[in-house]
Amino acid sequence: MSLSKEIKYSITLKFAELARQKNRNGENIISLGIGEPMFDTPKEIVDETISAINNGYTRYSNSSGLIELRTSIAEKFILDNKINIDPENIVVTPGAKQAMLLSLMSILEPGDEVINFTPCYVSYVPQVKIAEPTAIIHNIDLNKNDFTIDWEFFSKIINNKTKAVIINSPNNPSGKMFSNEDYLELIKRIENFNCYLLSDEIYEKFIIGEVKHISPGSIENIKNRVITINGFSKTFSMTGWRIGYLAAPEEIRHRIVKLAQHINTNTVTFIQKGVCNAYKINNYGLENFNKSLRKKVDFMLKVLPNVFLPPDGGIFSLLNIRNTGFDSDSFATQLLNEHNVAVTPGIGFGHNWDDHVRLSMVINSKQFFKGINLINDFISNAVK
Amino acid sequence: MSLSKEIKYSITLKFAELARQKNRNGENIISLGIGEPMFDTPKEIVDETISAINNGYTRYSNSSGLIELRTSIAEKFILDNKINIDPENIVVTPGAKQAMLLSLMSILEPGDEVINFTPCYVSYVPQVKIAEPTAIIHNIDLNKNDFTIDWEFFSKIINNKTKAVIINSPNNPSGKMFSNEDYLELIKRIENFNCYLLSDEIYEKFIIGEVKHISPGSIENIKNRVITINGFSKTFSMTGWRIGYLAAPEEIRHRIVKLAQHINTNTVTFIQKGVCNAYKINNYGLENFNKSLRKKVDFMLKVLPNVFLPPDGGIFSLLNIRNTGFDSDSFATQLLNEHNVAVTPGIGFGHNWDDHVRLSMVINSKQFFKGINLINDFISNAVK
């Protein structure tokens, strides 16, 4: 595909890699670029996985996933998300990333249009192009002053060719969550159009502010057109394990499984077995991690009140660097060179976000606070 | 993509699933449909993997793969395949299947043509369509009397739009291997064209006859245009672990890694660590398995001499069912219903192969022999 020549290396990976290199050279880098929770994977999952390897869960599984895992995910959906779905309509995938790609591949046809809110996860736009090179993507920017959505503008954009609306709540990189009001607006504005909602809920367990997580798949009059995407990576700190899942309407599920057969056969069988009881695990690293997220946000509100909108959820936040005069790549490069702090340029998350940089809030609080103070110094010097 | 509506469920999986269902109902099915070696994964790999989980190899890895694994694969390539390649040009993937898909995605552009030899692995044709919906596929049938290739015909097919030639030696489903003479013919006929060779060598360790395995990536005057695809699944009986790899020329490797970042991030990190020393393992199940393959072929030559061409390698073989009057799906269905033996219809491997069925040779010899005798009875009755 022509795309293979066009797409660039991920800018989120560029600064993470630069930070790693400098660390190897003995420089003490504070990396606010890393996108993975740092608590330990729960022992129960590790033990179950090892036991599954030893008990022969080492062969091909059904391309949809082990039925015992899909049954468990269906139970999780009821408990956590009020989503009532048959295990048959759940597909296990190697990561939530591939769940999104398979969903896009299964619904998009030549000339279809996609609505995407920016800033957004770096892979959404390339994935739309991989799924359907002729698809047209409409990016709708969050309001930079309060991260609200201009729903009037949404109504101007949506049309009969709109096949998919991508939602990511809590959002990477802004931390914005779709409130109940947002969903009411959305429902009102899509009801006359035949589009699917692709809801990426990978950060659902990281709630910082007052907004409650709502799964659109639980909302009565739209649930039949929602594909819910999630995974174990973030909730259980299992980023390297590559296991995600989706719940999709019947006709879409069939198409997804057929594509999955030719793209990856199945998700690693013993890892599927290892997470079968994951949703029942309590009291692991997540709770303390969430507490530390709130402390970090409080600290930023104190130190950087003018350039920072507190995230509703997720593990990232954005800084507005407009007043520094830097574009986001120069800001990140200079900050790394002068202060040994790694952040991610906003330009990676949308064309109009070159006046922001993304901070990841996953490293330990002491290091994080130090990094924020250094950023504050850097910004103060720049705006002088 | 439109393809998601067009492609059918894999016919290879249909009969395997039917056999499993009947087994669950208490019928004693002899399944010659299964495509995975049945010996145990070597203990060394299991131990290394478990140790990697316990030692924190649970986070994202580089999208190309762990450098220690790529270094190990480079050593394997020299030892086993006489392929001299920099670890930087190796990419680790979730299965050889995805290595083939990423290769096709990275080289095909609108209107490009692909040459494919049939019968072939079920996923090649759908993968070409996923990679580039407008690509044209030319299937070249093996000669049904001796599985030779009509190289004159190949020369008539290849043209300036040919971008890729797919080779799978040993071949699934026929067992055909590319001999030295085949490669000499191939080299002569591609030298004036700018096409890549995609060499899927997943069955390289299953050698039954006299033909030696040759990797085109080791051949001096074509090696710069070869993408070598392989994996751990078959050699080490790790089908459910999903780990494969490829070696590609510099410009292709870059495109592949960029695509991999948006499709799967990385292959499971602790599994990568677990196979780092795999190529050094000796004396595991593979040797006995290969012996049993030869015994099975000898048995078939005795019982079914008129409908069977012995495979050079791989774990499958084909039976010619032309004289039975059945198409391959009816043959497989009736054989399963009347004799409780599951095989795979040839139509799954190419339009012109509806007069063949595929047998997998992985189950234990006693069961296999019983199955062959039942097939012989079935054929004898049919041709009466």
Image (tube, coloured by chain):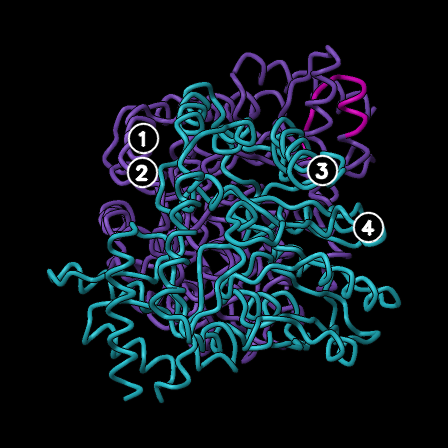
Chain colours: A purple, B cyan
Q: Earlier in the sequence, mark 1 or mark 3?
A: 1
The location of residue B55, given as percent across then percent down, is 46, 18
Q: Mark 4 belongs to which amino acid?
A: Asn
Q: Is residue A119 visible?
A: no
Q: Give the mark nearer the N terminus: 1 vs 2.
A: 1
> Any mark on residue A345, and which?
3
Q: Is residue A52 above or below residue B20?
A: above
The image's mark for residue A275 is 2
Where does the image place residue B247, in percent across and percent down from the top left?
69, 45
The residue under the point 51% across, 32% down is B269
In 3D space, how far apart are the residues under numbered discs 3 and 2 (Cα atoms)?
Answer: 34 Å
Q: Secondary structure at mark 4?
A: helix
Q: Secondary structure under badge 1?
A: helix
Residues marked 4 and 1, same chain: no
Which quarter of the picture shows residue B157? bottom right
Q: Can you give x and y, in whole percent of width and height, for residue B382 in the image?
A: 28, 85
* Residue B278 is a magenta residue: no
Q: CA distance from mark 4 to mark 1?
A: 44 Å
Say which mark, if any, is on residue B224.
Answer: 4
Q: Are marks 1 and 3 on the same chain?
A: yes
Q: CA distance from mark 2 to mark 4?
A: 43 Å
CA–CA distance in space, label 3 to label 4: 37 Å
How many marks can you see? Answer: 4
Residue topped by disc 1: A45
> Pointer 1 and pointer 2: residues touching (CB < 8 Å)?
yes
